[in-house]
Amino acid sequence: MTQTLSTKVLIIGAGTGGYVAGIRCGQLGLDTALVDGGDGLGGTCLNVGCIPSKAIIHAASKFETVAKAAAGGTLGITASTPAIDLAQTTAWKDGIVRKLNAGVAALLKKAKVKVVKGWATFSDAKTCTVKTADGDLIITAEHVILATGSEPVELPFLPFGGDVISSTEALSLDKVPGKLVVVGGGYIGLELGIAFRKLGAEVAIVEMADRLLPLYDKALTDPVAKWLEKHGVELHLGARAGSFEKGQLNVTTKDGKAIKLKADKVLVTVGRKPRTRGWGLENMGVAMAGPFVKIDDRCATSMKNVWAVGDLTGEPMLAHKGSAQGEVVAEIIAGRERAQAASGRAASASAQEPRFDPVTIAAVCFTEPEIISAGLGPEDVEGRDDVITAVFPLAAIGRALAIEAGEDGGFVRVLASKTDHRLLGVQAVGQHVSEMSNSFAQMLEMGAVLEDVAGVIHVHPTLGEAFHEASLRALGHAIHI
Ligand code: FAD
């Protein structure tokens, strides 16, 4: 029998955008229902994205450390040749995912959010039908937050299935492939390709652009390219992948030659697209911005009281962007409810409402070495003579040398305004640098000037000293160079 539910706020999708919006709505006292049709709460990031990939990357790095010791490393540690049971590694990773699924469920429960498991289809902007295990549930709401996320792009001539896999299957393999070809040299392909190389796979990367990680500037990606070269990863840049037949991937190289690459698995990571089809978005009267749902700086769509957050709304498709948007939307809805309760009239946008207007959304590539980019980079300020740029190498940082992170060409770079020294951007490349990303974002978000970074007594010995030194260098008085 069809059931019905009426709620103040309805959220579709329990990824990092949707579930954070749900928790915050609940904390603010809004009657909230959250619908998700996936396998576990937490969406792509928690189940098949950020967390599982970082778990596999971590396991691969541990394996590589032991393998290096076995091959006669420089630390005086000896070990015998390691072996890996990837099925066991995958089971360990699945355990982490399950723990986090349960954690999200508990947080939603604590916030009194009703979680409905099933796929939702909208018949109009405020009504959807959810196919649940107990039959259809029709939900109507005053506010709808769309957080349906994204899915991997499939190449028509290289459809997913069998040995042609997406990142989802790559994170659940039970055996390290002997030969892995990665199609697409963006961050997901490189993070996974590097992890499988560390685990012993022979890896080749086929990328249509002339260089890897085209969204990052060359100075940042050069150390990654060097790592790939040193570790025998075969690079085909400016090349086009074709079909996969009888264990061989057809590739047209940059100079037009047709070659075949042997592969046990072909991992296709050519991008992700917003999930806009198959759930009645077309019935909601919501305007689009290209393939994405169009939103303004309050995450409002063109339809009244329909909001959208996360990957569905555009680049950067990053977990922390969606979560931040989800919090803003919850605050706006709660603020309007309070205003309505006080005045007795429906409240609409006001100048005091929160906005999603970040100075920066820092991005990290968990490659080898890692890359961070926050704010403006050299390509954004090309031709401007009002910008100071300063670089400080990790090779001059004691901590980097002590943890073997000083030898791969890593650095921290700052960009600041010449006139008032305001920080415009910070980037870094190097082993373990990812943990610095939040201090870069904090400084940018708070409108820091170079003197602010220079004035912070940075802990010794840490990699963060490179940020301090880069800022000092921009001011003309670095200490350790
Ligand atoms: P999603 O996480 O995609 O969640 C959407 C949810 O909505 C899903 O659970 C889906 O089941 C549900 N849903 C969709 N339609 C319906 C419907 N009609 N009815 C019911 N439920 C529905 N980002 C980072 O910031 N850092 C990283 O290190 C990082 N690593 C990544 C690694 C990989 C391999 C991948 C694939 C992604 C990675 N990302 C990373 C990106 C990150 O996962 C996404 O940006 C993030 O998950 C987007 O969150 P979201 O809430 O927009 O959507």
Image: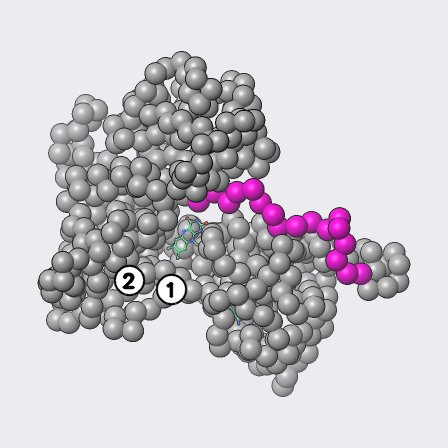
Q: Give the numbered dot on residue 268.
A: 2
Residue 137 visible, this orientation = no
Q: Is residue 371 above or below residue 307?
A: above
Q: Quadrant of the N terminus?
A: bottom right
Magenta region, residue range? 347-363
- Horizontal and vertical percent position of residue 369: 30, 38
Helix, strand or loop under label 2: strand
The residue drawn where x is 82% and y is 56% is 339
The residue drawn where x is 45% and y is 59% is 44
Q: Quadrant of the C terminus?
A: top left
Residue to which mark 1 is pinned: 152
Under 8 Å from ligand 1: the CB of mark 1?
A: yes
Left-right relation of 28 to 261 = right
Left-right relation of 224 to 40 = left
- Amino acid on which the number 1 mark rests in the picture: Pro
Please state which of residues 284 and 109 is positioned toward the viewer in this rendering.
Answer: 284
Helix, strand or loop under label 1: strand
- Horizontal and vertical percent position of residue 62: 28, 39
Q: Give the numbered dot on residue 363.
A: none
The residue drawn where x is 45% and y is 28% is 388
- Amino acid on which the number 2 mark rests in the picture: Val
Q: Is residue 280 magenta?
A: no
Q: Is residue 435 above or below residue 450?
A: below
